Amino acid sequence: DAMVIQNPRYQVTQFGKPVTLSCSQTLNHNVMYWYQQKSSQAPKLLFHYYDKDFNNEADTPDNFQSRRPNTSFCFLDIRSPGLGDAAMYLCATSYATGGADTQYFGPGTRLTVL
Amino acid sequence: AQSVTQLDSQVPVFEEAPVELRCNYSSSVSVYLFWYVQYPNQGLQLLLKYLSGSTLVKGINGFEAEFNKSQTSFHLRKPSVHISDTAEYFCAVSESEKLTFGTGTRLTIIP
């Protein structure tokens, strides 16, 4: 089945220690998104790629970076995680932007910062 | 700017009873509206979406929603819920490429 895969499902890191979260997709979609979802809150868009074009949300902290080396993979790098970065990180894909397209979500990576 | 309000953070419902989860949105332009469901420890899955046309939209798992432009609402309904419907439900609005979510409604089914 075509899908969005996130690894690992659970990640524990130490305060200030860089961490990378991974997302891959077999849907061959053009757009990949990263969301942050804190407990009992709505998912919040961090950034997205349309092909290789990177689009950062204005309020995404500089501590968060992303890479998309090819169509299938996208990475979220947190350079110096703080306690406030503990959250579920969701990757999603869509065929195109424009608003009408369905976004397909992966299962998420739950990040714990000690 | 677009925004979404889900008025109920938690809704307990007896099994086989009907349920309505409320969603109101604000936007200065025409929008697309979505309902997503999130089961425990899983990502979000699309239930249904409204793009245009008929205001009554049918989705998966027996859910439906009605778009009401004058009331800027997009409430989700199901005539008879099951234990398996226990989940978090998110309403979302999209004006262009950005999807804005509400804070979610946790639906709990009471046996």
Image (cartoon, rainbow, N blue to C red):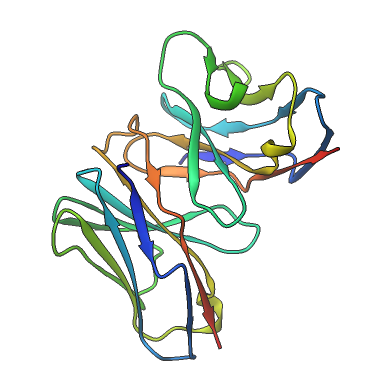
Residue depicted at 41% across the width and 70% down the height? A8
Q: Is residue B73 visible?
A: no
Q: Quadrant of residue B53?
A: top left
Give left or right: position of A34 versus B78: left
Q: Number of labelled discs?
A: 0
Q: Quadrant of residue B64?
A: top right
Give how far across and how far down residue B45 sits, in percent. Answer: 48, 40
Residue depicted at 19% across the width and 44% down the height? A28
Q: Is residue A57 placed above or below B7 in the rendered structure?
A: below
Give how far across and how far down residue A50 sits, in percent. Answer: 20, 49
Given residues A99 and B87, the one toward you in this image is B87
Give how far across and how far down residue B85 sits, in percent. Answer: 68, 36
Give left or right: position of B37 versus A101: right
Q: Is residue B7 placed above or below A88 in the rendered structure?
A: above
Q: Is residue B48 visible?
A: yes
Q: Is residue A48 placed above or below A103 in the rendered structure?
A: below
Given residues A79 and A110, the one toward you in this image is A110
Where's the N terminus of chain A, which quadrant? top left
Residue depicted at 74% across the width and 37% down the height? B83
Give left or right: position of B46 versus A114: left
Give how far across and how far down residue A19 sits, in percent. Answer: 37, 81
